[in-house]
Image: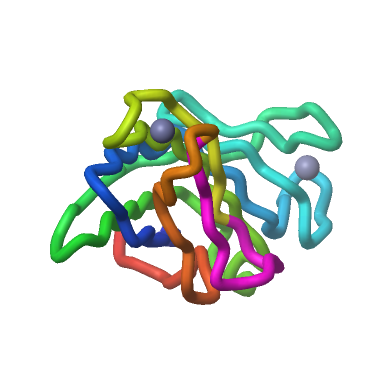
Amino acid sequence: MTQIGAELLLYAGTAVDFAETVEVATFCPVCEKTDRTIDFTREGAVCRGQGHAFPGRMFAREVVTEGGRQRASYVFESPEGKPLPSWGRIRFVATCGACGKTTRGSIQNNEQRPKETRCACGQLLVTDEQKQPTFRRVEA
Ligand SMILES: [Zn+2]
Ligand SMILES: [Zn+2]
């Protein structure tokens, strides 16, 4: 099992809703290739490029808000004995505390940081400051 996690700094009453699903680039035992993009949901997982079912699914999803930060983590099944994923993306929707409009965003590896997400009204909603998502192995 692998845990993927990321956090956002919240500004001015922003509310963040993290997605129920995650995307990860990892070894696919069906393709027998690394860096396949896999879409994980609670029901299952799909190897996106090849369109076949991936043997695994997403389990725990946890969101914690503390000290002006909101952190999301997910646990998903991953093949034993293979390197940790090379890339991941966690999508979110941020609701502006000033005007109430929603803005879509995502946290993914290989992006310039810090990264700001702003509302159409100009309000700074969230920033993404560190290299993330992070990955670590966890016990089943
Ligand atoms: Zn595959
Ligand atoms: Zn706004």
Residue closest to the eye, 60 or 5: 5
Q: Residue at x 30, y 57 (%)?
A: 71
* Total numbered badges shown on the rendered structure: 0
Q: Is residue 61 above or below residue 4?
A: above
- Measuring from the top left, give residue 116's x and y in whole percent: 53, 58
Does residue 42 appear to the left or right of 52 in the view shown? left
Q: Residue at x 54, y 75 (%)?
A: 131
Does residue 98 appear to the left or right of 38 in the view shown? left
**Res 81 → quadrant:** bottom right
**Colour mapping:** rainbow
Ligand 2 shown in quarter: top left
Residue closest to the eye, 77 or 91: 91
Magenta span:
108-119
**In the displayed image of the protein, which residue is found farthest to the left?**
66
Residue closest to the eye, 116 or 65: 116
- Measuring from the top left, give residue 49's x and y in whole percent: 84, 37
Q: Is residue 14 above or below residue 126?
A: above
Residue closest to the eye, 6 or 140: 6
- Measuring from the top left, give residue 110's x and y in whole percent: 70, 68
Does residue 114 appear to the left or right of 95 in the view shown? right
**Res 33 → quadrant:** bottom right
Q: Quadrant of the N terminus?
A: bottom left
Q: Residue at x 14, y 60 (%)?
A: 66
Q: Quadrant of the C terminus?
A: bottom left
- Measuring from the top left, give residue 99's x and y in whole percent: 34, 27
Q: Residue at x 59, y 50 (%)?
A: 89
Task: Check if residue 112 falls in the magenta segment.
Answer: yes
Does residue 13 appear to the left or right of 6 in the view shown? left
**In the displayed image of the protein, which residue is found farthest to the front?**
121
